[in-house]
Amino acid sequence: MHSTFLQPSDEVAAALSAGGPVVALESTIISHGLPRPRNLEVARELEEIVRSAGAVPATIAVLDGVARAGLTDAELERVAMEDGLRKLGQRDLPVAAALKASGATTVSATSFLAARAGIRIFATGGLGGVHRGWTEDQDESADLDTLARTRLTVVCAGVKSILDVPATLQRLETRGVTVVGYRTDRFPGFYLHSSGQPVDWRIETPEEAAAIMRGQDALGGPQTALVVANPVPAEQQLDPELHDRVLAEALAAAERDGVTGQAITPFLLGYLVEATGGASLEANLAAVRGNAALAARIAVAWAGA
Ligand code: PSU
Ligand code: MN
């Protein structure tokens, strides 16, 4: 990719060349995953969380055909508020570049761009994955494929609970993506503290994450990601009974309205926010805040290593 397509901010470029801690943040959660105007507050808050833990935030988005890593406040506002902003997966990036389009980047596009920029740690809410009903429509997020061939650490609250979580975990295993639970033996459930699925490895500290990253590099082999699955605290999770009931309604509504493709994830998340009276939003935000904080601590441990 030509260097003029990917432009880190001066602050991010300086931190990277000094070997300092940097955390990539994605923008689709801001533009398509959260309601306005709260999304803009959240975008700013996540950057602040990263800063207060001693790392430099690099929110990634494509603006007028240029991929930026590290946004000004005016650019952050565009991502949060601009109508018609596209949702860009990795495969959409060359088109956005060629057509000078603007768009928010998903986990797949953000991971790809972060790695290209030299950023090793990335925080998000929940990964995309294998959708329920995949035997019918083969809908599997490009997030999984990118993580199978990108050397990056992503801190997340598991995968979105709107997905087929066991199938997604199987795919991560098949594709060779390393997964560890952060202070948990259960894979997190995005809005829920636990998905009910086990996770094979458990770590207790950011330093252990950094040590695994060194191990990845020392071993060589395929450039796979490390997923650090960090659950939302149990006291901030969505009530599981409410979650299950409203999610069933949301899935039925998506089916009835014929929602498919890129629209399905924003549709389901939006439905949950409405139907839980904002409770799912609070759980989602608690998860993302925790992930940004942990990612910053891992970045600090990694930079000091
Ligand atoms: N995490 C959240 N909210 C979101 C997302 C992640 O808390 O909206 C976004 C990410 O950008 C992820 C995308 O890559 O949802 C998955 O979309 P799809 O299922 O269409 O691949
Ligand atoms: Mn999809």
Image: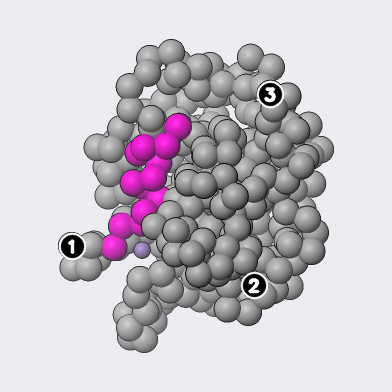
Q: Are marks 2 and 1 in contact (CB under 8 Å)?
A: no
Report the number of numbered marks: 3
49, above or below 216, in the image:
below
Mark 1: few/some/many CA within 10 Å (<14, 14-19, 20+): few
- Residue with the mark numbered 1: 135
- Which mark sits nearer the N-terminus, 2 or 1? 2
The verdict on residue 54 being magenta is: no
21, above or below 101, in the image:
above
Residue sitting nearer the eye, 286 or 54: 54
Residue 231 at x, y percent in the picture: 55, 42
Is residue 49 left or right of 65 when viewed as pictured? right
Mark 3 CB within 8 Å of ligand 1: no
Q: Quadrant of the C terminus?
A: top right
Is label 1 or label 3 in front?
3
Secondary structure beneath disc 1?
Answer: helix
Residue 247 at x, y percent in the picture: 43, 69
- Stretch of the chain drawn in magenta: 139-151
The CA distance from mark 1 to mark 3 is: 45 Å
Q: Residue at x 75, y 66 (%)?
A: 77
- Residue with the mark numbered 3: 19
Residue type at numbered disc 1: Thr
Q: Residue furthest bottom?
A: 257
Residue type at numbered disc 3: Gly
- Which mark sits nearer the N-terminus, 2 or 3? 3
Give the colour scheme shown. one colour
Q: Is residue 161 visible?
A: no
Q: Residue at x 80, y 59 (%)?
A: 73
Mark 2 CB within 8 Å of ligand 1: no
The CA distance from mark 2 to mark 1 is: 31 Å
- Residue with the mark numbered 2: 35
Residue type at numbered disc 2: Pro
- Which mark sits nearer the N-terminus, 1 or 3? 3
